[in-house]
């Protein structure tokens, strides 16, 4: 079965969808009003997005010139002075300045292009003092990528500036030609824009048909211009993300640190739950049992029948306490999962669900024990939700392997409306799955049905 990866912690995101919808729609997704009634191709030239992207291209040229001049001048100066010690701090200053330009470009991309790029790793000197800072800057890959961006950005900025300005001015100039055509006969002494002229002939755009055709050509160019500029700024987006954003390695390290925190928090929460269950359940019952047995011992001589009844009651309490301890042990890690695998363990969980559940496990071998445990607790939690909230009449659990991933899907025909939002049980389940590079997808429209799919790494040699 094919699987689809959903990036839940991407390096960057585009913010235009919500912003443009806000410009063109009524609040709450109501009926379209104003510009929103026009097709996208017709409203593009007057959208805020088109003007922001055009402003980005216009600003790129002076900023790119400044960044290029800084990079080339400082690197050349530093390289020339490497024969002396002064060249090293000069190169470090060049890289620090390039990082500053990179920070400016990230802010500009976020403001005008809607591209949110995470800040790269800051400079962390291993030693205190200027030499430690200089060494850290020179060893930083972010610094050199920022310098490379400053060198490469100029030729692209010149090209995109020329193309964007040419399209923008040509389109709007021709489109508005009927409004200012009168300037030529009144002040220029000619009928209109001259298309051709030599000593014998001259061709002017001066009759209604030619003026109309000129405006139509201008309209076509104007409608195309936003898409041309959008294509140009796409290259800028890729450059900012690729050269000025955090590296894939750094992003992965941040994700692993976050996952480690989730795992620690989850383990702490599980320990608190076990402690609470022991304190409020089996421990309290055993304390009461000890008191009852003490009273029975005191009554044994003077009232044997009462003592016998108390011992009989204590025997029942012992059975109840043992059952609670078994349930608690099953919640920590069921023996059936260790001994017989997911098929038997999930069948045992399904048998305790208040809704009839069909279980189908198609695994030729067992995954890693940790992954097997997460899969078991995921299904257990989902079946508990079905019992408590779904009002379903049937449910199913399917588990299979797809390449190097363990797939599981829990379905019910209940009322739906389940969400993995913050604070819900599904949100905690999603955090636990994502901590091992897994994915949890919830498809639960109001009215049902609900289908929850989890994808876990196999991780078995």
Image (tube, rainbow, N blue to C red):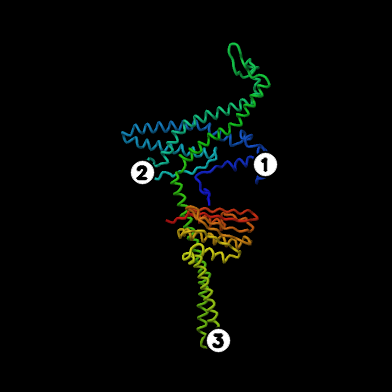
Circle 2: element type: helix
Circle 1: element type: loop
Q: CA distance from mark 3 to mark 2?
A: 85 Å
**If you read the primary sequence from the N terminus, does the residue marked by circle 3 or circle 2 appear first?**
2
Which residue position is annotated with label 2? Answer: 132
Percent x, y for residue 242?
47, 40
Q: What label sits on residue 214 in the rendered view? A: none
Percent x, y for residue 143?
41, 39
Which quadrant does the C terminus fall into?
bottom left
**If you read the primary sequence from the N terminus, does the residue marked by circle 3 or circle 1 appear first?**
1
Q: CA distance from mark 3 to mark 1?
A: 83 Å
Q: Residue at x 63, y 61 (%)?
A: 392
The correct choice, above or below, for 185 with respect to 351 in the image is above
Instruction: Please tell me whether mark 2 or mark 1 is closer to you in this view.
Output: 1
Q: What label sits on residue 305 in the rendered view? A: 3
Instruction: Please tell me whether mark 3 or mark 2 is closer to you in this view.
Output: 3
The correct choice, above or below, for 394 with respect to 286 in the image is above
Instruction: Please tell me whether mark 3 or mark 1 is closer to you in this view.
Output: 1
Percent x, y for residue 350?
56, 64
């Amino acid at each position: 079965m094919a699987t689809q990866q959903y990036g839940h912690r991407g390096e960057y995101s585009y913010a235009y969808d919500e912003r443009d919808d806000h410009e063109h729609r009524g609040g709450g997704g109501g009926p379209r009003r104003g510009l929103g009634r026009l097709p996208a191709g017709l409203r593009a030239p007057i959208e805020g997005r088109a003007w922001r992207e055009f402003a980005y291209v216009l600003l790129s040229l002076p900023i790119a010139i400044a960044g290029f001049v800084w990079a080339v001048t400082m690197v050349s100066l530093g390289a020339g002075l490497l024969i002396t010690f002064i060249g090293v701090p000069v190169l470090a200053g060049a890289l620090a300045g390039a990082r500053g330009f990179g920070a400016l470009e990230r802010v500009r991309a976020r403001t005008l292009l809607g591209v949110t790029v995470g800040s790269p790793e800051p400079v962390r000197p291993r030693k205190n003092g200027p030499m430690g800072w200089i060494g850290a800057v020179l060893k930083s890959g972010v610094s050199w990528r920022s310098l490379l961006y400053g060198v490469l950005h100029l030729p692209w900025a010149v090209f995109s500036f020329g193309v964007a300005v040419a399209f923008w001015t040509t389109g709007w100039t021709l489109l508005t030609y009927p409004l200012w055509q009168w300037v030529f006969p009144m002040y220029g002494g000619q009928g209109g824009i001259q298309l051709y002229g030599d000593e014998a002939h001259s061709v002017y755009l001066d009759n209604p048909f030619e003026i109309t055709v000129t405006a139509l050509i201008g309209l076509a160019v104007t409608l195309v211009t936003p898409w041309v500029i959008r294509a140009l700024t796409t290259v800028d987006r890729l450059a900012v993300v690729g050269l000025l954003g955090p590296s894939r390695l750094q992003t992965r390290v941040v994700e692993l640190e976050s996952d480690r925190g989730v795992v620690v928090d989850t383990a702490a929460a599980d320990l608190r739950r076990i402690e609470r269950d022991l304190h409020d359940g089996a421990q309290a019952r055993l304390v009461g049992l000890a008191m009852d047995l003490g009273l029975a011992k005191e009554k044994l001589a003077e009232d044997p029948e009462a003592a016998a009844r108390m011992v009989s009651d204590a025997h029942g309490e012992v059975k109840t306490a043992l059952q609670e301890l078994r349930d608690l042990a099953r919640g920590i890690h069921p023996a059936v999962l260790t001994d017989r695998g997911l098929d038997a363990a999930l069948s045992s969980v399904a048998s305790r669900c208040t809704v009839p559940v069909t279980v189908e496990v198609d695994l030729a071998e067992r995954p890693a024990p940790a992954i097997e445990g997460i899969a078991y607790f995921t299904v257990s939690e989902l079946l508990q939700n079905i019992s408590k909230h779904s009002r379903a009449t049937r449910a199913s659990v399917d588990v299979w392997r797809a390449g190097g991933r363990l797939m599981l899907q829990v379905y019910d025909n209940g009322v739906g409306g389940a969400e993995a939002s913050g604070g819900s049980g599904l949100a905690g389940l999603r955090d636990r799955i994502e901590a091992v590079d897994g994915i949890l997808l919830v498809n639960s429209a109001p009215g049902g049905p609900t289908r929850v799919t989890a994808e876990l790494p196999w991780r078995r040699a």
